[in-house]
Image: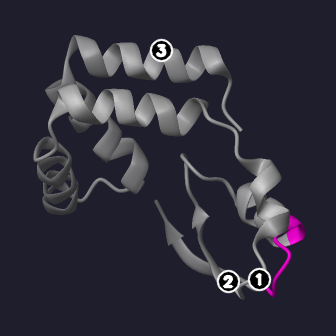
Amino acid sequence: GFEVSGIEAMLSNMEKGFYSWTLGFSLAALGTQDPKLCKEFQDSLLRMNAEEVIPLLRTILLTDNREVLQKVSVPSTIIQTQKDMVVPISVAQYLHENLDGESPVVIIPVEG
């Protein structure tokens, strides 16, 4: 659901300053101003090696595997938060419509 230019901009920001990126991302992704919770999430991001995670994230975000969904016949429960800046509800709906097996969608009434 992201534009390639937006993904490249995010990855560039990560490369320029991983620490600063983790701070901004943790605040935005959690959708909360709870300093303790944001700090915990930022600390978990900082435990990752930036030199390893950036190429991995580039691969994940720029690879399109939608054609595989129709081959998934195992029942799968799709758990989605009500408001998520990274994965919108439309992604859960798309998965539900395109997975071959039973795939109920459960929306959790939280943000982030």
Residue 10 sits inside the magenta stretch: no
Amino acid at pointer 3 = Ala
* Front position among marks 3 and 1: 1
Per the image, label 2 sits on a secondary structure element best described as loop
* Of 75 and 85, the residue lying toward us: 75
Q: Disc 3 to disc 1, how far (Cα)? A: 33 Å
Residue of label 1: 103
Amino acid at pointer 2 = Ser
Q: Quadrant of residue 106?
A: bottom right
Q: Is residue 26 left or right of residue 91?
A: left
Residue under the point 89% across and 68% down: 97
Amino acid at pointer 1 = Ser
Above/below status of 81 relative to 8:
below
Q: Disc 2 to disc 1, how far (Cα)? A: 5 Å
Residue under the point 31% across and 45% down: 27
Magenta stretch in the rendered image: 97-102
Above/below status of 89 relative to 16:
below
* Furthest residue toward front: 71
Residue of label 3: 9
Above/below status of 94 relative to 81:
above
Mark 3 and 2 residues: CB-CB less than 8 Å, in contact?
no
Residue of label 2: 76
Per the image, label 3 sits on a secondary structure element best described as helix
Q: Position of residue 66 (x, y in %)?
A: 77, 49
Residue under the point 62% across and 35% down: 63
Dot 1 crowding, Cα within 10 Å, few <14, some 14–19, many 20+: many
Per the image, label 1 sits on a secondary structure element best described as loop
* Front position among marks 3 and 2: 2
Mark 2 and 1 residues: CB-CB less than 8 Å, in contact?
yes
| Numbered disc total | 3
- Lower position in the chain sequence, tag 2 or tag 1: 2
